[in-house]
Every structure is written in structure tokens, then in C-alpha cells.
Image (cartoon, helix red, strand yellow):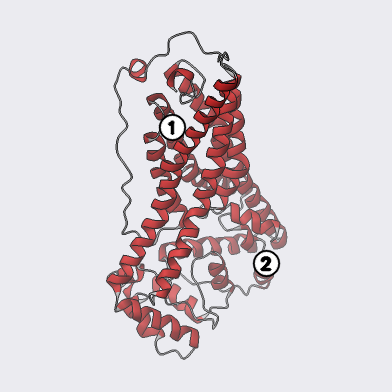
């Protein structure tokens, strides 16, 4: 794996790779250190407990959060396959049959269009479509169960099972310390701690639960992680040891959801717009494409073929008639469409026209800008370098917000609400 492919992976906010880098290598260790530092302001012993609890919480949760959904889905996919269905068939193809795009894709359309082709892999794909067309309800039920299992199981483990076990370990270790050191005293703050209702003038109660929509079958893994994060927030709040800890968990988890799933996309757009304004370079494309030597040579030779416009008919005609073109191959590399080994587009996959149109605009703009630059190779190198810098800057900025700004804000919030920097679930009077 090259450095460019690594940067490309962590720059794709629709995958788990940016989350993996931020969560495990930056956010978790920083949060652990900040938790220790903030608690050390008032009690070394509670700081030790907070460090241990946060370490377990961050890394065990990360393992389940990042790996739980893919592993669960893989297990359920094997069950779906045993039932005779191909889990790769996209249910959006049924919607396409009822939309304006039915002239170019859909279950009925794809069976008819690709059914006459002799290639073995195409015939297998069509057979998968026919099987599901004739058993739509049964397939939908299986995908519903897959979605529910992939989101609910990790959420329950992270939000409702892990926290009580972590708290139980703390209680057990504290009891052992009390037996060994019966006279041990923990330094506590002496001033009275205001309740949250006194601080805000309102009584707030945390209620509710996760209401997962089991009918959504085509969400990306990162979308399911966002849903599980919502369920995790409910779990963390409901299993908190006292109200103050519930308030702090709600503050922390809400901030984490926003900074993990919303902010990075806006940072990426902002950085790319800034690059266009400052460097006059189009960096919308992925660095793997910007650094594609074959594409650069084709631009120099003026032989790059691209769909003439963004109309559905034009796009589908192009990707089906020219699967080996640089545009089609680049689109496949970026996950916009999928070709079978025979070179025929996979009829089981749904093509998001809006996404493909945007990719065509970005692809065409880069080719035009590169051709007009005067030095295509220099332009491409500069575009790739700027894009890689933007991705790394995005990781750095979003990581700082998650790993430093949010934890600091969390303890300031805790101080304002409780009058103490100590983790409210670990303060002696609450245990």
C-alpha cells in the first residue's frame, strides 16, 4: 500500500478509515491523558481510577464500534447466502423501477438488458436479480434483520454492557483498597457542588431510547456507525452512576457525534475551496486519480474520453460502452460503479446518478485545468500535493477538536455544573 493510497483512504469521509485514525491513534490517548490531568487537579487516586476507566472505555469501545458492524454484517451475509440470496443486490434498484431513471436501470430493466448477455458472471448476476425479484419481501426481511443486528448488537455491548462492567471493576478495586488501607482518605473539594437544576434553573431528566429504523438496508458502514453512536449516547446516559455523570456523558457524546460525522466533511469542502481560491487548482478529485500517470499521459496526448454531459442516458451509454476508459475505470476505483470480471457493469449494483454526475464534473474540470496549465505534469503534482495536504490538515483539525477541544470543554462543563473537575461518577460521595 503506497503513501498516496493511505492518504486517499483516510481522506474518504464516507468510510471508517478517518474514524480509525482519529479514534485509535489520536483521540483515545489524548482523552485518557486529559482525563488524568483534569482529575489530578483535585485527587491523584480518582485520577488513577479515571485513567483506567477511560482507557478501557476508549479502546474497548473503539474495537466494538469500528469492527462490530462489519463483523456482524459478514456473519449475517453468510446466513443470507445460505438462504439462496445474494446480499450484494441493492434494493434501490426496486425504487429505480418507479422513478424517472427506470429507462436506464432497475430490477426489471437490468434483468431485460443484461439477461441476453452470454458471459457467465453476467448470467449469475441476472439469476441473483430474478431470485430476489420473485422473493422481494423475504429478501427485505433478511436485510432488515441484518441492519438491526449490525446496529443494535454493538450498541448494546458498548452502551449498556461495557459501562456497568467498567464501573463494577472500579468498585471492586476500591473495596480492595479500603480493606488494605482502611484509614485512607481521598482529598475532595470542600465547597458545595451545585446541582444541574440550580446551575440552569431547570429540572432536566434524560429519558428515551434508541429507535432504529430497521427498514433501511442500504446505509454505508459509516452511517450505521453514526446510528450506533446515537444509541451509544442513550446507553451511556442511562447507565451513568448519577445525574451529573449523565449530563457530562450527554455533552461528551453529542459533541463526539457532531465532530466525527458532520464537521470533517465541512472542513474538507472548506479546504478544497480555499485551495481553488489560493492556488487556482481543482482538488475535488481523490489523490489516487490526481497522481494517475496514465491519466496524465492521456491528458498530454489529448486522448481522455469523458461523457459529453451529465444526462442519465449519456452517462449510462458511456459507462456501458466504454468500460475500459479512464473515466469508467476511475469511477469504479472511487466506488461510483462496479464492473464484473468480464468487463460488463454489475447489474446488481445501483448507480447513484447524482454522485456520478458530480464525479464527471470534477473529472472534466481537472482535465481542462491541467490541459490549460502549460505544464500538465507540474500541475498534476501540485494538485496531488495540495489534496494530500488538505486531507492531512482535515485529520489534524478534526482530531484536535475531538481529542483536545472537546475533552477540555467537557471538563469545563463539568466544573460549571458540579463545581469540580473530578469525573462525577468517581467522586467519593456519589459511590
Give percent across and percent down for residue 426. Answer: 49, 24
Give the image quarter of residue 371. bottom right
- For residue 249, the mark is 1
Which residue is label 2 attached to? 296
CA distance for labels 1 and 2? 50 Å
The answer to whether one can see residue 397 in this image is: no
- For residue 299, the mark is none
Q: Which image quarter is the N terminus in? A: bottom right
Q: Residue furthest top?
A: 191
The residue shown at (54%, 33%) is: 53
Instruction: Tell me the mark number nearer the camera, choosing from 1 and 2.
Output: 1
Label 1 sits on a secondary structure element that is helix
> Is residue 220 toward the left or the right of residue 133 in the image?
right
Q: Residue furthest front?
A: 179
Give the image quarter of residue 150. bottom left
Q: Residues within 10 Å of mark 2 (few under 14, many from 20)?
A: many
The residue shown at (57%, 58%) is: 285
24 and 91: which is toward the camera: 24
The residue shown at (44%, 36%) is: 164
Give percent across and percent down for residue 222. Answer: 47, 53
217 and 278: which is toward the camera: 217
Amino acid at each position: 500500500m503506497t503513501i498516496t493510497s493511505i492518504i486517499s483512504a483516510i481522506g474518504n469521509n464516507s468510510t471508517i478509515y478517518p474514524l480509525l485514525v482519529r479514534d485509535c491513534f489520536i483521540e483515545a490517548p489524548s482523552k485518557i491523558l486529559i482525563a488524568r490531568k483534569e482529575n489530578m487537579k483535585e485527587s491523584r487516586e480518582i485520577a488513577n481510577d479515571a485513567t483506567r476507566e477511560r482507557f478501557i472505555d476508549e479502546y474497548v469501545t473503539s474495537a466494538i464500534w469500528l469492527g462490530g458492524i462489519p463483523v456482524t454484517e459478514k456473519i449475517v451475509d453468510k446466513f443470507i447466502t445460505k438462504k439462496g440470496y445474494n446480499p450484494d443486490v441493492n434494493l434501490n434498484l426496486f425504487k429505480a423501477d418507479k422513478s424517472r431513471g427506470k429507462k436506464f436501470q432497475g430490477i426489471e430493466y437490468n434483468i431485460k438488458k443484461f439477461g441476453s448477455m452470454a458471459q457467465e458472471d453476467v448470467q449469475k448476476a441476472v439469476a441473483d436479480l430474478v431470485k430476489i425479484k420473485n422473493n422481494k419481501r423475504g429478501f427485505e426481511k433478511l436485510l432488515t434483520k441484518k441492519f438491526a443486528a449490525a446496529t443494535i448488537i454493538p450498541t448494546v455491548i458498548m452502551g449498556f454492557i461495557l459501562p456497568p462492567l467498567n464501573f463494577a471493576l472500579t468498585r471492586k478495586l476500591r473495596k480492595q483498597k479500603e480493606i488494605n488501607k482502611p484509614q485512607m482518605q481521598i482529598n475532595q473539594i470542600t465547597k458545595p457542588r451545585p446541582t444541574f437544576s440550580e446551575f440552569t434553573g431547570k429540572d432536566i431528566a434524560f429519558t428515551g431510547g434508541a429507535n432504529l429504523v430497521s427498514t433501511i438496508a442500504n446505509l454505508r458502514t459509516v452511517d450505521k456507525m453514526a446510528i450506533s453512536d446515537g444509541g451509544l449516547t442513550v446507553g451511556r446516559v442511562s447507565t451513568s452512576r448519577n445525574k451529573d455523570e449523565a449530563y457530562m456523558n450527554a455533552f461528551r457524546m453529542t459533541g463526539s457525534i457532531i465532530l466525527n460525522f458532520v464537521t470533517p466533511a465541512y472542513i474538507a469542502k472548506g479546504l478544497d475551496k480555499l485551495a481553488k481560491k489560493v492556488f487556482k487548482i481543482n482538488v475535488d478529485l481523490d489523490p489516487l486519480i490526481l497522481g494517475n500517470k496514465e491519466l496524465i499521459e492521456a491528458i498530454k496526448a489529448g486522448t481522455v474520453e469523458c461523457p459529453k454531459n451529465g444526462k442519465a442516458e449519456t452517462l449510462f451509454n458511456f459507462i456501458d460502452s466504454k468500460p475500459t476508459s479512464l473515466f469508467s475505470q476511475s469511477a469504479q476505483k472511487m466506488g461510483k460503479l462496479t464492473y464484473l470480471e468480464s468487463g460488463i457493469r454489475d447489474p446488481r449494483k445501483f448507480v447513484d446518478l447524482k454522485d456520478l454526475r458530480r464525479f464527471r464534473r470534477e473529472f472534466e474540470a481537472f482535465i481542462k485545468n491541467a490541459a490549460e496549465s502549460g505544464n500538465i505534469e507540474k500541475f498534476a503534482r501540485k494538485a496531488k500535493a495540495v489534496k494530500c495536504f488538505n486531507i492531512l490538515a482535515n485529520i489534524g483539525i478534526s482530531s484536535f477538536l475531538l481529542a483536545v477541544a472537546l475533552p477540555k470543554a467537557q471538563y469545563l462543563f463539568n466544573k460549571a455544573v458540579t463545581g469540580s473537575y473530578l469525573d462525577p461518577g468517581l467522586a467519593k460521595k456519589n459511590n
